[in-house]
Image (cartoon, coloured by chain):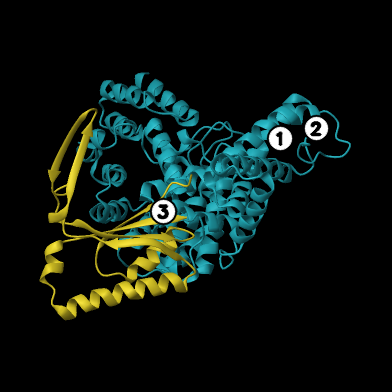
Chain colours: A cyan, B yellow
Amino acid sequence: MAGPARTTGAAATEPADAADAVDRAWRAHWSPVLGLLIGQFGRPDLAEDALADAFVAAARRWPADGVPSSPGAWLLTAARRRVLDRLRAEAVHRRKEPLMVVDERTRALAVEATDPGAHVSDDRLRLVFACCHPALAPEARVALTLRFVAGLATAEIARLLLVQEPTMAARLTRAKKRLAASGIPFATPPPERLDERLDVVATVLYLVFTAAYHPTDEPDPLRTALGDEAIRLVRVLDGLLPGRPVVRALLALLLLQHSRRDARLDDAGALVLLPDQDRSRWHADEIAEGLAVLRSVPPGVGQAEEYRLQALVAAEHATAPTADATRWGVVADLYGRLEELTGSPVVRLARAVAVAETEGPEAGLALLDGLDAALPSHHRVPSVRAELLARAGRPAEAAASFRAALGLVHNPVERRHLEGRLAATEA
Amino acid sequence: MRFLVLLYEDERAWAALDADGRAEVFRQHDAFSAAVAAHGCTIAGGEGLASVDAATTIRRRGDDVTVTDGPFAETAEQLGGFYLVDAPDLDVVSELVRLLPEYTIEIRPTIEL
């Protein structure tokens, strides 16, 4: 059988250009193509393997054959062919049926599988809802979405969800096996059942957004496109199920956080912390919209209230004319309410920072007690402690904490920041 | 796909039911069967089981065979019956079993060979 459609007349490409093209195709096409494949075949396990194979084929073929004019279509064709090969092999193995019968059934399956999610017009949002099936464990739903919708690698998902990589690999494998074996339909629920999955879907979209702000060394160090995409999906969700507090509060939160994106890295790609950011580079229109959306969300309960409180914190920062003018007392109080609601150690960490601003570094340090046990692989615990120790005039202890943080940090941008702080402390 | 639907119940609850209560249970099973047919699915098999007093457990470890009375596991809820249902996916089966009386229900797909 011939390979996927080639570009007519494409000349051989420089290997470096072809490798760039594969990289770009990965970022642009992984999740949309995966969504199409899963929509067509209803088999996320096969779809993912097949698409990975298609990328391997692209890395091999594009340098020799030229980069196709439509990389997405090339990848879809190549991956689709591999899914069909695998389905055929499975069916032959199981039933020893002639190939033609299998092809017919596969086509029938493909036709059946495309329609049921039509009430959700957006492909990626359909995929998010499909990943959030109640028969999957909540952490598995989140992991699957980050994998299938955001196209993140296992290591990235593990870091986002604060678990060890082997744990995450095992969790993903188990979730995919369970999807394949338990008869769980990988499909968008009917309109009247969408609300049941709303909280999980909101959680997942927030994590996709968070993933955009874990700086990497890629060409786009803050993957702002991923942040844009998360906001777009929340807007689609807000249109699909209007007036849901959890969705409105999340939209406000994301807009307020996203408005600061251009000020978060300096020209050399180094991290700029909130107090040092150039506030003129914040997007005022997005701040205004975020505040307006936030005003439309009444105080509530549960996850909607969590997002509302977080958005109120973001609003305090966004509206403070200067870093020094931040109403830290209000922020500390909001984090206090949030900690009461969630019991989350990550919230405690943020609260410690706010409390240190109003009551001094020692008060912040006291709130860090016990957090190392709760967040053993999180570099922010020792890095916040280090900052507070430095401010409390205890440089030797601060340096030791910066070293502990350096032992845990993964991404290069944050590593450089911590190295700089360590050097300054020791100077 | 074929799904085995296992129904677990507290046998004492059934024993304590009066005639009307039992008639209601049978009515719910009938409603389930009717709904399965109405959804284009089929019941490929199913039985109610005699009480665990009638159960015999046989364990084989190599050549060692022990025979004991009673069910495999001692719990408050016991396997009381089962259905084997042919249905397109888990969601369809989970919807249909809502019509059954209040059991703890385990749904397991069979392996297609």
B65, A74: nearer the viewer: B65
Examine the rendered structure and indicate whether residue B35 appears above or below residue B56: below
**2 and 3 marks on the same chain:** yes
Which label lies toward us, 2 or 3?
2
Q: Is residue A271 visible?
A: yes
- Residue furthest toward the top? A427
**Where is residue A105 drawn, in percent x and y?**
63, 54
Question: For the residue carrying disc 3, how many other residues have a C-alpha within 10 Å: few (<14), some (14-19), or many (20+)?
Answer: some
**3 and 1 marks on the same chain:** yes
Spatial separation of the CA atoms under disc 2 and disc 3: 41 Å
Q: Is residue A284 visible?
A: no
Q: Kindly identify which chain the residue marked by label 2 belongs to.
A: A
- Which quadrant of the rendered structure holds the N terminus of chain A? top right
Q: What residue is rendered at 61% in x and 60% in y?
A: A114
Residue A117 lies in quadrant: bottom right
**Where is residue A288 drawn, in percent x and y?**
51, 62
Q: Secondary structure at mark 3?
A: helix
Spatial separation of the CA atoms under disc 2 and disc 1: 10 Å
Examine the rendered structure and indicate whether residue A33 appears above or below residue A312: above
Q: Check disc 3 and report the residue beneath it.
A: A203
Residue A7 lies in quadrant: top right
Q: Is residue A45 left or right of residue A342?
A: right
Question: For the residue carrying disc 2, how many other residues have a C-alpha within 10 Å: few (<14), some (14-19), or many (20+)?
Answer: many
A22, A111: nearer the viewer: A111
Q: Is residue A416 left or right of residue B98?
A: right
Q: Check disc 2 and report the residue beneath it.
A: A66
